[in-house]
Image (spheres, rainbow, N blue to C red):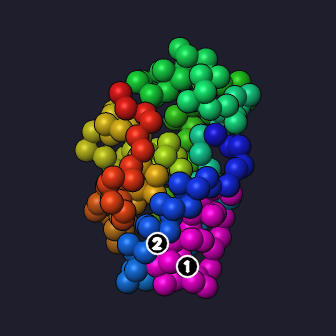
Amino acid sequence: GWMDEGLNENGVKLAHLSGDGMKGIHFDECITSPLKRAMDTVNIVLQDSGNKGVKVETDDRLKEINFGINNGLSYHSGNLPEEEIGKFFSDPFEFPGYEGGERIEDVCRRTQEFLKELCARDDGKTYLVGTHGCAMRAMLNFLYEEPADFWQGQVPYNCAVNIIEASKGDIRLKEKDKIYYDSSYIVDRYKR
């Protein structure tokens, strides 16, 4: 959710490995969620990929889903109401949201608005965009072959990269959920 925590030790490690794996990719600009964990990730990736000094902007539309009164509660701790959080993973478009929070449709609307605006610039630049798992799936939902499968078979792994190409109004998902680190480092706590 919107709880503003930094990366844990594993997150820092994966960000460094991802940045190292992206050496040779030039980024002109970076736009990220203002949440600390996303900002930490893009800063590490930029530094380790050889893009230190690239301008970093924040955009609130890239934040993770807002869990309202349940922001900060952990799925793994069992503190979230089981029926609703179960629906969040099994049938996200029917997830009712939590008081003061968002539904999946809300996240799709704000993240897709961001992506379409960015792509409409048609400026030939390469952008690094930092966001979160649910927000990323929401942003790309209209580009998937099966948009009804919101999670695309799984919650994205940490530091998963999606490559988008945009030109003259045409937006295409070129690569989905690429990881730049050895798959042995994947921790999938959300298996169905």
Q: How many marks?
A: 2
Residue at image position (50%, 42%) is 134
Q: Is residue 62 above or below residue 105?
A: below
Regarding mark 1 in the picture, which secondary structure is present there? helix
Tag on residue 47?
A: 1
Reply above or below: 11 against 67: below
Q: Residue at x 53, y 54 (%)?
A: 10
Q: Which mark is residue 155?
A: none
Q: Are discs 2 and 1 less than 8 Å apart at CB?
A: yes
- The structure residue drawn at horizontal position 59% and vertical position 56%, both measured from the top left corner, is 9
Residue found at the far top of this picture:
83
Instruction: Please name the amino acid that badge 1 sits on.
Output: Gln
Horizontal side of 190 relative to 171 (left or right) equals right
Where residue 47 sits in the image (x, y, percent)? 55, 79
Point out the tag, 2 or 1, that comes first from the N-terminus: 2
Q: Is residue 162 left or right of residue 102?
A: left
Task: Find out whether residue 20 is within the magenta segment.
Answer: no
Q: Which quarter of the figure has residue 76?
A: top right
Amino acid marked by disc 2: Gly
Location of residue 44 by image quarter: bottom right
- Relative to 64, 6 lies left or right: right
Residue bearing mark 2 = 19
User: What are the residue bounds of the magenta stretch?
Assistant: 36-58
Foreground of the two, 51 or 128: 51
In x, y percent, where is residue 161? 40, 60
Q: Residue at x 39, y 49 (%)?
A: 186
